Image (tube, rainbow, N blue to C red):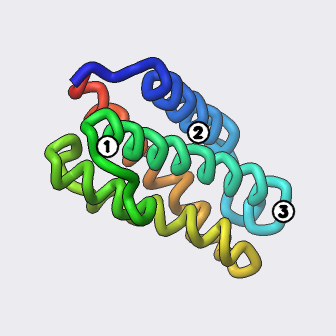
Amino acid sequence: MKLNGPIQRKLALLDERVRQLERRFSEVSFEEFSTEWELQAIAERGLQVAVEAVIDIAERILALNGQGPAASSAEAVRACAEEGFLESADPYLPMVGFRNFIVHQYDRIDPKVTFDILKNRLDAFRHFRDEIDRLM
């Protein structure tokens, strides 16, 4: 499949956002993170944008494949896996769930969860990028 410019731009945005998050939070302790609302806001927005890029790419790939819009963001990711564009939806569904949580239940975000993603789970975004790169 030949990927178009919008997908390539979203992949570049995804890469940039992950690099920015790593750079900004590489030396931040959980104690500092949990007491500084500004750090939490930066992390939440950065992660939201990264996940939105994943969702947009999944939806765009489905459209390029002649499929109609998915019923939800999670369904778009699942459909990409079912069509063989992704090995599995499993690594990416928690991303979508986190995005939904910070958008809709923003008053209940646990800083431990956000910090864990920053420190231990950003590679999932790179894995997604690598899977999409293979389509090109």
Type of the residue with mark 2: Glu
Q: Quadrant of the N terminus?
A: top left
Q: Could you say which disc has been placed on residue 22 in the image?
A: 2
User: Residue 118: image x %, image y %?
Assistant: 56, 52
Type of the residue with mark 1: Leu
- Could you classify mark 1 by the number of other residues whose Cα lies within 10 Å: few (under 14), some (14-19), or many (20 or more)? many
Q: Is residue 39 left or right of residue 97?
A: right
**Quick check: can you spot residue 127?**
no
Establish if 84 lies above or below 104.
above
Establish if 55 lies above or below 22.
below
- Could you classify mark 2 by the number of other residues whose Cα lies within 10 Å: few (under 14), some (14-19), or many (20 or more)? some
Question: Element at badge 2?
Answer: helix
Dividing the picture into quarters, in which one does residue 22 lie?
top right
Q: Is residue 77 left or right of residue 85?
A: right
Q: Is residue 129 left or right of residue 90?
A: right
Q: Is residue 132 left or right of residue 48?
A: left
Q: Residue at x 44, y 59 (%)?
A: 73
User: Residue 86: image x %, image y %?
Assistant: 22, 45
User: Residue 95: image x %, image y %?
Assistant: 46, 59
Question: Element at badge 3?
Answer: helix
Q: Return the residue at label 1.
A: 62
Marks 1 and 2, the one that precedes in the sequence: 2
Q: Return the residue at label 3.
A: 37
Establish if 44 lies above or below 10.
below
- Disc 1 to disc 2, C-alpha distance: 30 Å
